[in-house]
Structure formats: structure tokens, C-alpha cells
Image (cartoon, helix red, strand yellow):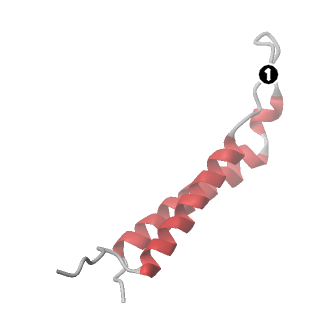
Amino acid sequence: MKDTFIFGRRNYVFMIAGLLLIAAGYVLMAGGGSEDPAVFNDAIFNTRRLVIAPILVLSGFGMELYAIMTRSK
């Protein structure tokens, strides 16, 4: 009996790329806190954390959806 995978190679490549985009987005969101809780750090409101990182995460989820829904050849 031949073992077959549910998805094709192309689907798995898109899944891995989507996971890398999601991970990169979360890494870009990390940080920006302050060592002293009494001191406020404005670094949490920069463009990298508020714009770029969420775009990467959402595009990664979109790529995952595409990888799952596309038909393997």
C-alpha cells in the first residue's frame, strides 16, 4: 500500500513560508518594554510594531490559508 500525503510539495512550501512570515511578524512585535515599571517607554508605539509586524502576521495567515485551499498538482 502506497503512503500518500494529503498535500503536495508546493502546498508544504507555501505552509513553511507562511509560518516563517508569522514568526517574523511576532519577532518584530516583541520588545519595547521598560526595565522600570514606573518609567514609560514610547518605543512600543513605533511603526515596526504597529504597522509592519501585523501586516507580516496577517499575510502569513493568508499564505497558510492559500496553502491549505489550493489544489496540489
The image position of residue 68, as x and y in percent, is: 37, 70
Question: Mark 1 is on which residue type?
Answer: Ser
Q: Is residue 60 above or below residue 29?
A: below
Quarter in which the N terminus is drawn: bottom left
At 22% from the left and 81% from the top, the residue drawn is: 2
Identify the image quadrant of residue 42: top right
* Residue at the far left in the pictured view: 1
Q: Foreground residue, 7 or 57?
A: 7
Above or below, 25 against 1 in this view is above
Please provide percent x and percent y for residue 48. 76, 48
- How many numbered discs sit on the rendered protein? 1
Report crowding for label 1: few under 14, some 14 to 19, many 20 or more residues within 10 A (C-alpha).
few
Relative vertical location of residue 72 with respect to residue 58 in this rendering, above or below: below
Which quadrant, please, contains the C terminus? bottom left
User: Residue 31: horizontal and vertical position, in percent?
Assistant: 74, 34
Residue under the image location 42 percent in, 72 percent down: 67
At x 34%, y 75%, the residue is 7
Residue 39 or residue 69, whichever sits in front: 69
Q: Secondary structure at mark 1?
A: loop
Left or right, residue 7 beside residue 37? left
> In the figure, is residue 70 to the left or right of 14?
left
Q: Is residue 69 left or right of residue 10?
A: left
To which residue does mark 1 refer? 34
Question: In this rendering, is residue 22 above or below 3?
Answer: above
The image quarter containing residue 70 is: bottom left
Residue beneath the point at 48% across and 67% down: 15
Judged from this view, the residue extending furthest toward the top is 38
Furthest-front residue in this view: 1
